[in-house]
Image (cartoon, coloured by chain):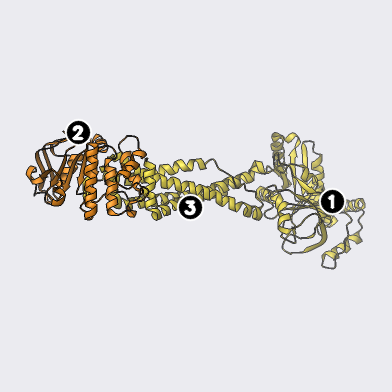
Amino acid sequence: MSLQLKNVLKTYREPDGNVLTVLDVENFQIGAAEQVVLVGASGGGKTSLLNVISGISTPDQGSVTVDGTEITRLPEVARDRFRAERIGFVFQTFNLLPAFSALENVLLGMSFSGRRVDTKRAKELLDRVGLGHRITHRPPQLSVGEQQRVAVARALANRPKLLLADEPTANVDVRNQNLILDLIREACAESKVSLLMVTHSADVASRFERVDRLENFNRAAGASR
Amino acid sequence: MNLFSIAGKSIRQRFLSSSLTGLSVALGVMLMVAVLVIYGIMDRVFNQQAVGYQLIIGPKGSDMQLVLNTIYRVGAPLQNLPYLYYEELKKDPRIGVAIPVCLGDTTQQGGFPIVGTTEEYFFNEYAPGREFTLRGKQFSESFDAIIGSQVHLTNGWDEGTEFRLVHGGAESHVHDEKFTVKGVLAPTGTPNDKTVFIHLNGFYAISGHDAPIREAVKRWHEFSGQPTNDAAIDAATAEWRKKCGINEADEEEEKHAEKGAPHHHHHHGACDIQKEVTAILVNMKGDSMTAAAMFSGEMKRGHKVQAVNPIMPMQRLMSDILGNVRTVLVVMTTLIIIVSGVGIFVSIYNSMSDRKREIAIMRALGAQRRTVFAIILAESILLCFGGGIVGILLGHGLVFGAAPIVQQQTGILISPFAFEPIELVLLPALIALASIVGVVPGLAAYRTDVARALAD
């Protein structure tokens, strides 16, 4: 089992004092090297779910287990370290650091893991995503498709066990959408990385064998942002 | 990638604002370094290392004026001492070296101070362990001159150049007598570089540098405590006239000449009673400090002269006036640096709202809170430290650039590579300042709400 959420409840206190439940998940699992796409309406709690899984935020109750480690029991420092080492993240808006070259963006992900920074691997990964010739370019000098490919390389840099992708193709054109989707899926398959991709695109979802609808397992769906 | 290279990237990304804040630190540090180095140089110029004499003997009056005038050739001389006193002093068994100096005139070209002295002046070290190097010849004739290096450079004078003197004081009267440069001194980094030395005999031979004989006799009697009634003065005057072979007619003629009639040369060699010296430079036998102190004390009890350790008034000047000036300048430059530090704080703090997302991305990639705190702190340290290094280089560059100008203007030889040990404190102090100003923005980074910042 690569990911398991059990009885996870996440609430926010709104400015008016009301308590808003965004996640209420009894059970959600992803197997090792499994690729899952999660679809749901906007405001269904997808981002909150990814934050809880990655340990960026903690649930009010319940447990999240990633690659055999119950991260909800870890203190924040250990969760950060765990995230750096075992979880890859691809964001909708790429979230590359503009001052850093493509290579440095990949190395940056490595430098927070506590492991040795492996420039050779970073270059190989950029080569793998088809950017071997643009490693010194900074994000503003790259097309959006290229930027997202750098983000994919960065997410895979620390050999994660779980890759979280939050609408990774929402901001790219159709050609790049297919390219990036294939790239993520192939790279995860090659490295036996479990993949959880969030999307609202039926087209993207149609390519996955397992498609989960958020409202099917999140009892709070529809209530949150 | 370490913290500093990550911080460096961030500085580069905001290059203009970063370089301006770094520059403000650099300018503050530059001023601080310049103040420290220049004060250090002044301190050395005015301290023990700069003067090769234990005592300056001159008439009673301000010791500072005596030293400033005699050693640094600044300001007007005090009254003069009778030459006969110098002759007497030389015979004192405790005295090792006694060199007479006469000041007051300047060169017509360039206005360099004239010092009438004996060749002994150049045999004595001008500062402990430092001897004059002379190109050319020593004094041999009355109208021989030796010039300092700056006089050589500024006036273009060299061996064989002839020049005239301007009488000191209110009226600018050009003396008729021509002097000839015989030798040029190597640079010493002391006021000697800006001085023209003439033979003492030449100085006395200049018309107007000897007092009328009766007046001189009276003055000597007053000085040495001999009877000053008319009869005694008349008798002594007659005796001196005889001794020096001067008749009254000569003197009358001289008086007329003084009153504006065409000068005619009368180098009869002034009579010793008529001669005066401005000051006497003294070293005790064996350079004994105790003997110098005792001698100085003895002179203090008398009425006529003072024997001043040249260091004392200079140190007083340094500590009382220049020391305070330095303190004020150091405080001001410290404030400038602190203001620059505040500038760094403002610059980083203002950038924090733009960088919330950047920080959130790093945190999402696994950076810990303390890591992002340290990155911001590192940025502040890099700006302060970088600014500090640039400032130190600029400060020394300033001294380096100013050294030849200062030397030309003042004769003070500044080593372009002069370094003050206190500068070593600057960089650690800047790091401390950077740490203080970096804490608040660092804490903002530390507290960044990752989920919210990523969602924005």
Instruction: Decide if residue B349 is on the left or right side of residue B452.
Output: right
Q: Which of marks 2 and 3 is in front?
A: 2
Q: Do the residues labelled 2 and 1 touch (CB within 8 Å)?
A: no
Q: Name the residue under label 3.
A: B27
Q: Name chain B's colour.
A: yellow
Which amino acid type is shown beneath numbered disc 2?
A: Asp
Q: Which residue lies furthest to the top in this view?
A: A68
Q: How far apart are marks 1 and 3 (CA)?
A: 61 Å
Residues at marks 2 and 3, common chain?
Answer: no
Contact flag, marks 2 and 3 (Cβ < 8 Å): no
Q: Is mark 1 on a helix, strand or loop?
A: helix
| Mark 1 lies on residue | B273
Q: How many neighbours does mark 3 have within 10 angstroms: few (below 14), some (14-19), or many (20 or more)?
A: many
Frontmost of labels 1 and 3 is 3
Instruction: Specify whether disc 1 shares its chain with disc 3.
Output: yes
Q: Residue A16 in the image: state x and y as whole percent.
A: 12, 51
Chain letter for the part of the structure drawn in orange: A
Q: In this view, does A48 lie to the left or right of B444?
A: left
Tell me the chain of label 3.
B
**In front of the other: B343 or A50:** A50
Closest to the observer, B206 or A133: A133
Q: Mark 2 lies on which chain?
A: A
Tag 3: amino acid: Leu
Q: Determine which residue is flagged by label 2.
A: A67
Q: What element carries label 2?
A: loop
Which picture quadrant has residue A216? top left
Query: Which x, y percent locates residue B298?
Result: 72, 39
